Image (tube, grey):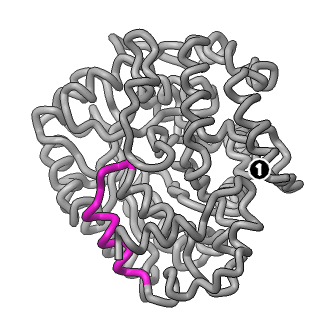
Amino acid sequence: MEKNCRRIFLKNLIGGAFAAAIAPLSSAFQDINKKRLKKGEMSYRRLGRTNLWISEISLGGSPVPDQAILQQVVERGINYIDTSCTYMNGNSERQIGRLLKDVGRDRVHVGTKFHLRGNWGEESIIKSVDGSLKRLQTDYLDVLLIHGASNPEQLTDERVLGAFDVLKKQGKHRFSGLSCHSSHHEIVTKAVECGHYDMIQLGYNVFDIQESEKNVETYDDYLGASGTRKLIHLAASKDVGIIAMKTLKVGGKRQNLEKYKTGEISIFQAMLKWALENQNISSVVTEILTFRQMEEDLAVAGQPLSEEERKSLYSFVAQNLKDYCHMCGFCQNNCPGGVLTTEILRYLTYFESYGKAVEARQAYSCLTSRATVASCRNCGICEATCPYGVSIRRRIKEAHTLLG
């Protein structure tokens, strides 16, 4: 039955059966013009209630490019840079700090993050942020974020809120936020409803058009069990800003994507355009490591997605979806052996699709044996609960072989 569902989905996706469901997106660019400011070649959108106007294309700091490219992206209009205390062992923040001195602090909005790992508390968060400020050579952050909030309880923990409050009173950050890598529904919903967070950095990419193979009532929108678009709409209803990340994440192993090119538009440019169609997205954060990537990404700002490009995107999704993890967390939350399946599949993506072999192996090595394939009981519950039919057991074994 599941195989039949998958075949039907593949046929419908390539054949364009989603056209009616996504029709509002085709006109979204007409509506979004009311919420866009354009200066030079870059367009800017409001980041929710922060009232910061940030570039549609933002720069990711893991890793950051060399100083020549850093300065050039700012000159070309990018005014938001995302980083973290752990990126490049702190060197990401150091390089951005040098940039701020060169171009002027007022030209760039900076967001950095702290982790909730090990024996953390209010004091350790404050110490982490003070370290970030020193490396960034600045007195304040435009946005301070929790890095990869792993459960909704963290968001209202008195130690977290206490640290945010102390740092805010000290003038060390203007707005609060979080990034979310998994269990999106619970974490994003909590972040919006608790009212403590001004923005969220959330994974959002073209694979979110994929329907789930199982009917999950909790997430009943047409994007399937991840319910990503519904979450983004919820955030917008409370004026919580959304920055999309992992937009250029591709399914399965690294591959030649030239066959999906439409005219002069690459598959990566089409992916960025697709995400920016959503008028509730303020910006898409991407890594820009070469001048070629800079030109490719900047060319997307303010440009709509053509129907030919859309069709190419959907063909790409249909042919690569079986190995793509949506990070919904259902498998991990239901694993009786405690295997951190979602985390493992995320590290596998870093290895296969991002070219971050060293980082992926380091992250995997930090997992205890009880959290890896060693504790897998081969019961199949993970696959039974996966709304997308991903071959989870096979994939975590592949991850162990590649990363272990």
Residue 388 vertical placement versus 166 (above, below): above
Please indicate whether residue 105 sits to the left or right of residue 401 in the image.
Answer: left
Instruction: Identify which residue is drawn at 70% across, 51% down.
Output: 226
Task: Please state the horizontal and vertical placement of residue 35, each as a whole percent of the image.
Answer: 59, 20
- Please, what is the dominant secondary structure of the magenta stretch? helix
Q: In which image quadrant can residue 89 be found?
A: bottom left
Q: Magenta stretch: give its range.
A: 353-367
Please indicate whether residue 227 sits to the left or right of residue 260 in the image.
Answer: right
Q: Could one spot residue 165 in this view of the protein?
A: no
Q: Amino acid at mark 1?
A: Lys
Task: Please state the horizontal and vertical placement of residue 311, each as a whole percent of the image.
Answer: 60, 19
370 or 220, nearer to the observer: 370
Dot 1: what SS? helix
Instruction: Identify which residue is drawn at 51% across, 70% down.
Output: 396
Residue 200 vertical placement versus 71 (above, below): below
Q: Could one spot residue 112 in this view of the protein?
A: yes
Task: Please state the horizontal and vertical placement of residue 175, each as a whole percent of the image.
Answer: 48, 51
* Residue receiving disc 1: 3
Task: Please state the horizontal and vertical placement of residue 231, each as a whole percent of the image.
Answer: 71, 46
Q: In which image quadrant can residue 196 be found?
A: bottom right
Residue 197 vertical placement versus 41 (above, below): below
Instruction: Identify which residue is drawn at 35% across, 71% down.
Output: 403
Please indicate whether residue 197 sits to the left or right of residue 59 in the image.
Answer: right
Quadrant housing the C terminus: bottom left
Crowding around mark 1 (Cα neighbors within 10 Å: few <14, some 14 to 19, many 20+) is few
Instruction: Identify which residue is drawn at 49% across, 72% down.
Output: 397
Q: Is residue 77 magenta?
A: no
Please indicate whether residue 350 sits to the left or right of residue 196 in the image.
Answer: left
Residue 139 vertical placement versus 292 (above, below): below
Q: Is residue 359 magenta?
A: yes
Q: How many marks?
A: 1
165 or 115, nearer to the observer: 115
